[in-house]
Amino acid sequence: MDGAIWFIIVFVGLVAVVGLAATFVPLYARWRAYQQSSYLRLDLPRQLEHAVSSRLVARERGAIIGALVVGGAAVVGFATGVVDGFESGVTTLFIVGAVFAGVGLGTAVAALTGKKQVPSDRPRVARSGVATVGDYISPLERVGAWVIVAIAMSVAVWIAFVDPGSGRLLVPTALFAVTAALTLVLFEVASRRIVEASQPAGSTAEMVWDDALRSSAIRDLVTAPLALGVYGTVFGVFSLADRSVGAAAVAGYLGVGFVIAGLAATLLATVVSRPRRYFLARLWPNLRWSDTADSDDRANAATDAV
Amino acid sequence: MLTIDPKSPVPPFEQLRLQFVEQVRSGELAAGAKLPTVRRLADDLGLAPNTVARCYRELERDGFIETRGRNGSFVSAQGDPAEQQAQAAARAYADRIAQLGVSRDDALRWAKAALGQ
């Protein structure tokens, strides 16, 4: 690995360590909770502030630790020569891919551990219907992950078919595709487990916020297969076009153009559809910003309105 | 939404049963809607599984819900045969809308247009 790659690794590692340290600072945890409240346009009651902020940073901590462990293992593998024979650009892609896989793994572990308890003398609320994974994540993101992973797998199979002897192209593409498929399985299994877990809540606000945290965890989980699928597809199609000549090269670059245009269109559609608030439209369609506020704040608002 | 108040003089089983009956009657729980499993609801509400199971049994006996083997418990269609058919059609429409990822506002607008409103 050359100096530039080492510089990037050290820089990203430092950022991750600082980010990890920040998750232990109460002020940062509160800031993250209110940032989420602002994104979702949902009041955060004072009595939920600690629970929400600690769950948010616990998941963030899990994601960073996962990224450091898996990304670090990839760096050690390349640095010691255990994994060798790739171009330096591919090495960087592999390390970033490992970081994404680590984020997915860490998020899954953090989201599935930890139990919430409500004191037995408080009223308890529960949903009378059944929520599914589809209520917490927009179809664009969930189906998008399946589609991009399928494309990455197809590209790997195509390379194996047209150029089976090209290990330098086939191995990285296949590795990206297989890792993307594995993280997709992890996403599906973990998100089902998250949704099926019991949801003890003492108020509607608590339940809405629990839904918000579930939705955010599930959306974090889908990032890994999406990113790795995109990596595999772009790397495979671009490398294939780069090594082709004549009409095959033209077709390859057209393929690159289609892939990039498709990704840009999907990204734009995702941003426009406000996926972060998707669960509110599905599970709480009539909820207003102030519905989750502290009861005394609501009373004051009502008085002000009069 | 279901609420169980441990300080209420009404037993938890009865609180739960009355809320389900009210939600089915008001249409908040539509015909065909799936209910949570006994274990899940007991965990969520901090009740014994037997309490929830007894509530489901009584709701089934009174015709508010039906159990479809391992698929779980579902809200039964209420009212006369025509109303029951209409509720089943409404549930099929709602399920299809969810599959298509269409917004509730659009779905309601189209349903109203189809009804000539």
Image (cartoon, coloured by chain):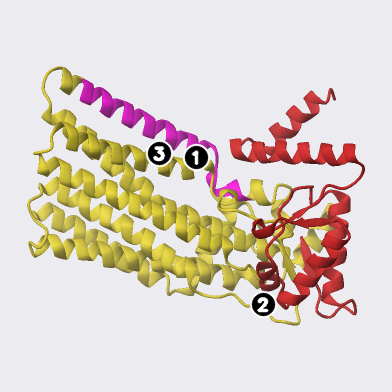
Chain colours: A yellow, B red
Mark 1, Cα crowd under 10 Å, few <14 / some 14-19 / many 20+, is: some
Of the pair B1 and B66, the residue shown nearer to us? B66
Q: Which of marks 1 and 2 is nearer the N terminus?
A: 2
- Magenta-span inclusion, residue A205: no
Separation of disc 1 and disc 2 at Cα?
A: 35 Å
Q: Nearer the viewer, mark 3 or mark 1?
A: 3
Residue corresponding to mark 3: A147
Residue corresponding to mark 1: A140
Residue corresponding to mark 2: A118
Q: Are marks 3 and 2 on the same chain?
A: yes
Please give the name of the residue rendered at 57% of the width and 48% of the height, measured from the top-left corner. A134
Q: Is mark 2 on a helix, strand or loop?
A: loop
Identity, as a three-letter code, of the amino acid under mark 3:
Val
Identity, as a three-letter code, of the amino acid under mark 1:
Leu
The chain that hosts pointer 1 is A
Q: Earlier in the sequence, mark 3 or mark 1?
A: 1
Separation of disc 3 and disc 2 at Cα?
A: 40 Å
Q: Give the position of the N terminus of chain A as an image quadrant.
A: bottom left
Please state if A173 lies on the left or on the right of A64 as rendered.
left
Residue A35, position as x, y percentages in the image: 53, 58
Residue B96, position as x, y percentages in the image: 65, 37
Please give the name of the residue rendered at 29% of the width and 37% of the height, measured from the top-left corner. A154
- Magenta-span inclusion, residue A266: yes
In the image, the segment drawn in magenta is A251-279
Please state if A48 lies on the left or on the right of A260 as rendered.
right
